[in-house]
Image: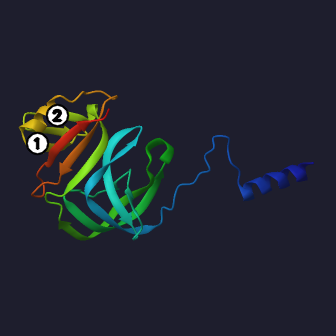
Amino acid sequence: MKTLNILSLTALLLIGCDDDTGDTGDTGDTASVVSMVVDNHMVLCSAEGQWLCPSVQIDGGDWGALYCGISNLDYQWGTTYTLTAEVVGYSDPDMDGCGDVYELVSIEEESFDGASRAFELSWVYGIKITASDTGGVLMDSVPFTCADAAVCDSVAAVSSDWKTTYSLSLENPAQQGDPLILTAIAQHE
């Protein structure tokens, strides 16, 4: 009987077993290095909250949102980056949408090409838009200026709650380091 138990235990150790938590222990491919193109504006990401994350093309594939971003990349709005990044970990995509976690290895090319380039952010929660006299702050850290007084009046009227959402029409700054330009804001019905 002892021989059978030892053989059974050895077999389980060799083939592995899944615990009842549903975690298979997959930590992602932490040895891979990828080439990325990072777009000149960020996109809205949502999971257990809302934030802005880079829009990237990995190894020439389709464009998509990179929920965890790229550590050590000092991202500047209006700038397109061609870079190399390494997968340094794996985050639970059910919780935060991340999946692979990336760290910057090197920047091959960087060009400020987004001056006055327009883009949209839709379904932004009102709580994530803070008004000021000449613009405001988006997502607690991204400053913007209003294209005109009417836009600033619309921002001042934003309902700062988690139920009301807005579409924002924005432009990248005219110079690197300047705030984004909000050209229009509309509440979702």
Q: CA distance from mark 1 to mark 2?
A: 9 Å
Residue sitting at 48 percent across and 61 percent down? 30
Residue sitting at 26 percent across and 65 percent down? 81
Farthest residue in the right direction? Answer: 1
> How far from the left and from the top, in percent, is residue 174?
10, 57
- Disc tally is 2
Mark 1 in CB contact with mark 2 (< 8 angstroms): yes
| Residue 67 in view (yes/no) | yes
Q: Earlier in the sequence, mark 1 or mark 2?
A: 1
Q: Which residue is mark 1?
A: 146
Residue 90 lies left or right of residue 185; in this view the side is: right
| Depth check, front residue: 28 or 172 | 172
Q: Which residue is mark 2?
A: 155
Q: Is residue 23 above or below residue 84?
A: above
> How far from the left and from the top, in percent, is residue 116?
14, 57
Farthest residue in the front direction? Answer: 189
Q: Amino acid at mark 2?
A: Val
Task: Name the quadrant containing residue 159.
Answer: top left
| Depth check, front residue: 98 or 127 | 127
Q: Amino acid at mark 1?
A: Cys
Quadrant (top left/top right/bottom left/bottom right) for the C terminus: top left
Circle 2 sits in a helix, a strand or a loop, which is it? helix
Circle 1 sits in a helix, a strand or a loop, which is it? strand
- Badge 1, how many Cα within 10 Å: few under 14, some, many 20+? many
Residue 131 lies left or right of residue 26; in this view the side is: left
Task: Name the quadrant containing residue 109.
Answer: bottom left
Q: Is residue 154 above or below residue 2?
A: above
Q: Is residue 14 above or below residue 160?
A: below
